[in-house]
Image (cartoon, rainbow, N blue to C red):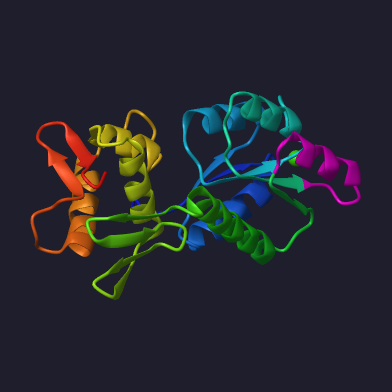
Amino acid sequence: MTKDQPRVLVVEDEPALAEGLAEALGFQGYDVDVADDGERGLDLAMRRGYDVMLLDVMLPRLDGFEVLRRLRAAGRTVPTILLTAKGAEEDRVRGLETGADDYVTKPFALRELVARVAAQIRRTRRERHEGDVFEADGMRFDLGRLVVQKDGEEIVLTPREGEIIAYLRSKQGNVVTREAFLLDVWRYPTATVETRTVDNTLAALRRKIEGSAEPRLILTVRGKGYRWGGG
Ligand code: CA
């Protein structure tokens, strides 16, 4: 398993459906967690970072609306696709008003759901960095389009690399620890510490944009982490 997989939380109490969703999304390369009641779903969504949450409306212990309401009240913006029952138009309206990003109506084709998950991930990544265009060290960065122009050539970034640059830069030259990267960019749970993942990815990114020259943008701060040198 690579660490670059988008993470999806499925909150669904019908075992067969939850299993089918987990399998279909896992097959697409997503890292999937499943919660079979609202309380557990809320707990996971509060503690861990996800790229998308699939949220059933009718759930034991806490219904989907309440899960979403509490998440949004706590400032958690995880993109959420509601799984609503056929014919329940008012659920869709209420869901969107509560802060859902999209919905699908049961019964749905797994393929459609998987396509909507992918669309949601693309959309949030694009929105997160749309218009984030700047120059540094003679290069022109466009993080919305995930490209860097250097000496008339175009270097294409992965979504993760784009996030790393945006995150480093947002700290305005202050040190970013490996742990902070794991939490905020990789969205790992707090307990996990795999700092080599960060070092390897940043080393590769540095080679990609800075080549073999003395690094001027992605600077290592010994024993602490990294900082952005591009102003
Ligand atoms: Ca249900």
Above or below for 210 versus 75: below
Residue 157 on the magenta segment: no
Name the image quarter holding residue 226: top left
Residue in the picture at 50% in, 63% down: 28
- Is 200 left, or right, of 113 in this rendering? left
What residue occupies the far bottom of the structure in this picture? Answer: 152
Quarter occupied by the N terminus: bottom left
Residues drawn in magenta: 84-100
Quarter occupied by the C terminus: top left
Above or below for 78 versus 63: below
Asked whether residue 193 is in view, the answer is no
Asked whether residue 6 is in view, the answer is yes
Place of residue 76 in the rendered image (x, y in percent of width and height, measured from the top left):
57, 32
Q: Which of 26/224 is in front?
A: 224
Residue in the picture at 31% in, 39% down: 181
Q: Which of 170/52 is in front?
A: 170
- Is 215 left, or right, of 86 in this rendering? left
Number of dots carrying numbers: 0
Above or below for 116 versus 47: below
Residue in the picture at 48% in, 28% down: 47
Place of residue 213 in the rendered image (x, y in percent of width and height, measured from the top left):
9, 60
Residue 96 on the magenta segment: yes
